[in-house]
Image (spheres, coloured by chain):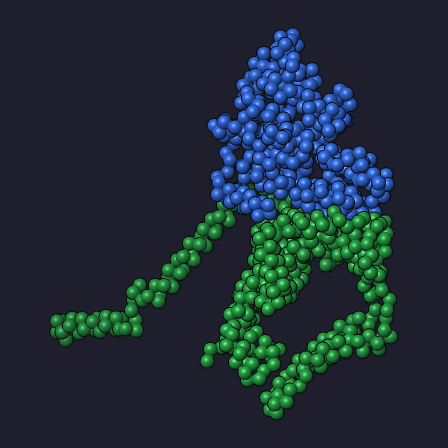
Chain colours: A green, B blue
Amino acid sequence: MPERLREKIGATRGYDRFMENTLPGSIPFWLDPKKRAIMFQIAVLAMVGLLAYYLVSNTLLNLKKQSIATGFTFFQKESSFEIGESLIPYSAANSYGRALVVGALNTLKVAFIGVVFTIILGAILGVARLSSNWLVSKLAAIYIEVMQDIPVLLQLFFWYAIFYETLPFPRQALCPMNGVYLCNRGVAFAVPESHPAYKHMVLALLVGCGVVYLLRRWARERQEKTGKIFPVFSVSIGIVMGLPAITWLAFGAPMNMDIPKLAGFNFEGGITVSPEFIALLLGLVLYTAAFVAEVVRAGIQSVSKGQREAAMSIGLRPPLVLNLVVLPQALRVIIPPLTSQMLNLTKNSSLAVAIGYPDFVSVANTTINQTGQAIEGVALIMAVYLIFSLSTSAFMNWYNKRVVLVER
Amino acid sequence: MKLFKVCAVMVAAAVIATAGVAVAGTLQEVWSRGVLIAGVNGAVFGFSMPDKKGVWKGLDVDTAKAIAAGVFGNANKVRFTALTGVQRLPALQSKEIDVLCRNTTQTLTRTTVNGLNFAHVNFYDGQGFLVPKKLGVKSAKELEGATVCVLPGTTTEMNAADFFRKNRMQWKPLVIEQTAELSKAFFAGRCDCLTSDASQLAAHRSVALNPDDYVLLPEIISKEPLCPVVRHGDDQWYDIVNWTVMALIQAEEFDITSKNVDSMLRSNDPAIQRFLGVTPGMGKALGLDDKWAYNIIKQVGNYGEIFERNVGPNTPLALERGLNDLWTRGGLMYSAAFR
């Protein structure tokens, strides 16, 4: 083959290859907006990572230079401090790790109970605010305005002071009803003595819930098929209450109560709820309920009057109007701001340190005090509140998806 | 308040994270700043608390003033920063303050794990129990089942827990962070007894509505040597703080007071001449003016004067010298030799 021809063929092949590379399917990656975007993302991530690495390594280095201990090895060490109240067995001989768990559980306890009461009280207040009764509506309005405007820390101090200033010493404890004592050490009340019957009653309750769930499904299907309405609500109540009651009777109806008795400085037996817990719960619930009431009112008012009138006009009774028409539409407005109020309550519970309730911050503070490892301690506090908040949000978002209006 | 504290700790962490590590030179920093920054408690009467006019008063305050007098020749060049128990160590570690005079107990952990140096003790204390008289308790061993108000502090909670564990007694701690709130809860009867360092208990009792209704139990359950504290890694600064406290003690031993210090300059005792800088050398060795000890005693007084003025029998605290007396009178205050 002559030399020149061979060159020509070679050149043509090169050209073909070039053409292949520039086909629409294979643009160079720096010209592809999608790939470029990913690259920018990676670059930013790398920068953030490097910055974090720099901060952490520099901190560690400097701490080491100042011979300050780092790390979380103190978790296993003996805590050697007591905690006033605990949901799990704990003593000063346990580890720091367990102490922190006790604190986290105490925070969860007050946050969970607080959220439940806040939603109940907030819903009642929100409805009362819309009441056609002038007095009820104005009283609710005054409550909401006053409670919203007083900082929650002041409210905590107020309720706590009421407890220790006005209630008598244990020896002169008030006894409003048999087995209940009120004093400046808290509220002590009788609980049933432990008996195998109670374990079975809990089982019966769970079984009852299962039965009710099935019953509701069956009732709905039947109603869809035949149009007959089954009294689900009253029957459900009967099953849920009745099953445990029958179990209780079957075990010979144990009646013995564990009654608190004055022993030494304090009450023994029964259950004692500390003034710190009650003050914290009261402060948080009364404060947050005011905000929740406004959220509920806004939700209900967002459902236009026409919806209600239309429901009435097709002959629905008022409870059904509320359940089938108003609430489903109101809930989708209520849930998102309600979530944020729940998070507020959880975070505000850290004000517990001010009145001596041993919540997570309080226990973490003592840990920081004793180990001197402030950075780890504060990081833990942030991590724990982040976990609480994120899991609350995740749950509420899941619930929100279920109630959100399905557009058709 | 909590938010503020978390912020303070965070800032401290950030400062530790970003600031380069001290390469000695706290003295140079203090000099170029023109003022000493001392961390104090701020809420313990007799140790560190501003009076009605906002002037800081107390034994810890005077210790810091003595350091300033030695460093600047002027006891008033101090800025006081009130710190809670949780804030104090990070504040020192992150160089927010030059020295911590906040009734801080010297412990092994703090010296090692937290990287701190403790100067000579400026108050020997011990943890005790304060109870209302009407409780009828004569000894801490009768506190089975009691609710105990605890001032949070590194060693306080631990000492109390150790004491009750050792004696196999049940108890309930109530830990409130703000001293004033805890005090209120105790005086209102929320708890049966209050535990803290005996000196602080005396301070608390002195502000009660009726101090005579309360009594300190005889048990002292811990050793609390309270010292000024500095960071690891600056030996010169540590020497200055350490020898300032010793100078206060040595001056009392020499019978040098703020009133007679000028006439003492003419003393024939060579030890006193060295101490007051008439014979030069001591101050130079520390990197300070040779008149440093003279300035301290002239402007602040010796240890005995500081004690009497702030916590002694004629103050509301009415504390006896006890362990804090000179070794020559049966106490523990003993200075190393000024040679």
Quadrant the N terminus of chain B occupies: top right
Residue B26, position as x, y percentages in the image = 52, 30
Quadrant the C terminus of chain B occupies: top right
In this image, A196 relative to B254: left or right? right
Foreground residue, B6 or B106?
B6
What residue is drawn where x is 80% and y is 49%? Answer: A168
Q: How many marks?
A: 0
In this image, A142 relative to A176: left or right? left
Foreground residue, A290 or B200?
A290
Foreground residue, B279 or B90?
B90
What residue is drawn where x is 68% and y is 43%? Answer: B181
* Image position of A215 with respect to A98: above or below: below
Residue B241, position as x, y percentages in the image = 60, 27
> Dividing the picture into quarters, in which one does residue B221 lie?
top right
Residue A234, position as x, y percentages in the image = 70, 80
Residue B281, position as x, y percentages in the image = 56, 16
What residue is drawn where x is 61% and y is 15%? Answer: B276
Task: Looking at this view, name the residue that lies furthest to the bottom.
Answer: A226
What residue is drawn where x is 54% and y is 19%? Answer: B289
Task: Looking at this view, name the residue that lies furthest to the front.
Answer: A134
* Image position of A310 with respect to A268: above or below: below
* Image position of B123 with respect to B137: above or below: above
Q: Is residue A170 visible?
A: yes
Q: Is residue A17 visible?
A: no
Foreground residue, B153 or B312?
B312
